[in-house]
Amino acid sequence: MQHRTTTTVLLGVAQTLAWASSYYLPAVLAGAIGKDIGISTSTVFGAFSVALLVSAGIGPYAGRLIDRRGGRPVLIASNVAFAAGLATLSQATHASHVFAAWALMGLAMGSGLYEAAFATVVRLHGQDARSAITGITLFAGFASTVGWPLSAYLESTVGWRGACLAWAALHLVIGLPLNVLLPRASRPGQASSNEATAARKDTGAGLAPAQQRRAAFLMAYVFAVTWFISTAMAAHLPELLLASGATLAAAVGIAALVGPAQVVGRVIEFTFLKRAHPLLSARLATLAHPLGALCLGLSGTSAAAVFAVLHGLGNGILTIAIGTLPLLIFGAEGYGQRQGFLMVPARIVQAGAPFLFGLAVERWDDGALWFSALLGLSAFLALWIMAMDMGKKEPAVPPASGAKAP
């Protein structure tokens, strides 16, 4: 238990740094970067989209390496790649330099964000990794809370170039040592015969090969839809609230509720839903955004805060489901590579989400929420089909930490 808690804390802090210095960086620095170099802010975000596409391509390879050698060396390498990408970005003087820097950052993101962290704890703890996955997301849920103010402070004091260099230094001074302290994973051949038998037994949760393929397809679809909605809301939520009739101050304040609501959602998963199967948690979570959109559509601005909170709650739980669903349904064997492949569609649609949903907002204003709500309902339907495929007899949740199976 103590071993798993230490791993959770180390990865949780390291992931907070990784997300704050990559995914949440453009929101604060894109304007300053574009103005200084002489390119549009949208071009900077285009470079960020390239990073997401690169991360989609590198994810399965990083996952396979974690399956074979454990996550420690992969995550250490990601810190070096993050530092190199940020240092390269700090020296950019042309649009091509920005794209090159973000492509390098994409290598780091594909091998150093949630999927790699989840694969690391699964490689270390197998089927008992669910609580660690939840704990990691609880820490990293504060990445924007830490990252946005710190990036803004650094930009105002040392400029955007200095801010990038500071984040690069933090990866080498804080992130890398944290990942160095992670336990070494045992070699695959060193697992006991009982562990190997258990790993084979839990793989696929008793599903036939055709059912496993269908479950993988449906899961990849759910992950892609939920990441599309999450990224679209992150880019356009204040604009949507303005279109619904909220004032600028109210729109910004209400949008800020999403972050804390995500953390609350993860706390709910860690406590009340701890013993529930991830399929149940995920089905409930996919309904949160459509329900919030319905409230906003029927009641207008008076329900804007309800929408933001419901969206955040669902998004927080779904982040955990991305790590736990593959583990519970397919098992721990080959988790890293499988997770990498399952997330490829999600990374691709995430790269295009701000632009595509922006077109919907331009055409339909706040009516674009009905589009995202229908997507959320389609994800619920996909999860319902998965549950039906499993014969309404969902796999048993592993015993609580410290307990032994009878």
Image: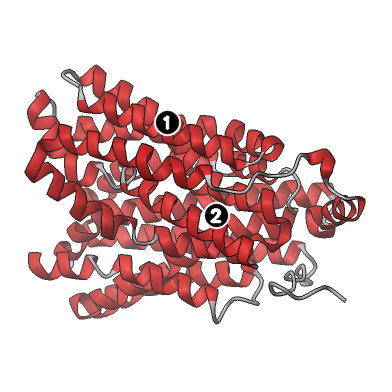
**CB of mark 2 within 8 Å of CB of mark 1?**
no
Helix, strand or loop at mark 1:
helix
* Colouring convention used in this rendered image of the protein: secondary structure
- Can you say whether 289 is above or below 276 in the image? above
Instruction: Please tell me whether residue 128 is drawn above or below residue 192 in the rendered image.
Output: below
* Residue 67 marker: none
Q: Is residue 119 left or right of residue 310?
A: right
Characterize the local packing of mark 2: few (<14), some (14-19) or many (20 or more) Cα atoms within 10 angstroms: many
Residue 18: percent from left, percent from top: 39, 45
Q: Which residue is mark 1?
A: 80
Report whether 283 appears left or right of 190: left
Q: Is residue 50 visible?
A: no
- Location of residue 207 by image quarter: bottom right
Drawn side of residue 195 relative to residue 311, left or right: right
Q: Residues within 10 Å of mark 1 (few under 14, many from 20)?
A: some
- Residue drawn at x 65%, y 77% is 275
Sequence-wise, the earlier of marks 2 and 1 is 1
Residue in front for this viewpoint, 23 or 215: 23
The residue closer to the viewer here, 162 or 236, is 162
> x, y percentage for residue 70?
65, 41
Residue at screen point 85% across, 54% down: 195
Mark 2 and mark 1: Cα distance apart in space = 32 Å
Q: Residue at x 74, y 44 (%)?
A: 186
Amino acid, disc 1: Val
SS assignment at label 2:
helix
Which residue is disc 2 drawn over? 222
At horizontal 26% and vertical 51% (from top left) the residue drawn is 235
Percent position of residue 73, x then y? 57, 35
Question: Where's residue 320, x and y in %?
Answer: 53, 61
Q: Nearer the viewer, mark 2 or mark 1?
A: 1
Quarter of the view holding residue 170: top left
Three-letter amino acid code at disc 2?
Val
